[in-house]
Amino acid sequence: MESVTTKRFQKCYASLPLQVQQAAKRAYLLWKNNNMHPSLHFKQIHDEKPIYSVRISLSYRALGVKKDDTII
């Protein structure tokens, strides 16, 4: 599975505290190597739409929309 970011995501990411940015980077690298790693809780969160969530920390999640084999 591939991933791409949007300008909106990049703007939101830049506004996060440095600690959260670092946690997000670690979670992304883990997801890239094994998107089903249990600590990520990567899952579809909408019954009909291809909206997915991945855990960054206990307080933060990243959301994405799946299109073909890409998460946006």
Image (spheres, rainbow, N blue to C red):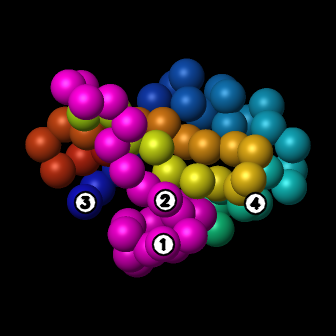
**Residue 3 vs residue 46, the one in the foreground:** 46
Q: Tell us which disc is closer to us: 1 or 4.
A: 1
Report the residue marked by disc 2: 41
Instruction: Using the image, determine if residue 32 lies above or below residue 70.
Output: below
Q: Amino acid at mark 4?
A: Gln
Q: Tell us which disc is closer to us: 1 or 3.
A: 1
- Residue under the point 64% across and 68% down: 26
- Residue under the point 19% across and 37% down: 67
Report the residue marked by disc 1: 38
Report the residue marked by disc 3: 1
Q: Please report whichever mark, 1 or 4, sits nearer to the chain's N-terminal start.
A: 4
Q: Please report whichever mark, 3 or 2, sits nearer to the chain's N-terminal start.
A: 3
Q: Is residue 5 visible?
A: no
- Residue under the point 45% across and 74% down: 37
**Span shown in magenta:** 27-49
Q: Please report whichever mark, 4 or 3, sits nearer to the chain's N-terminal start.
A: 3
* Residue 28 relative to residue 50: left or right: right
Q: State if disc 2 and disc 1 touch (CB < 8 Å).
A: yes
Report the residue marked by disc 4: 22
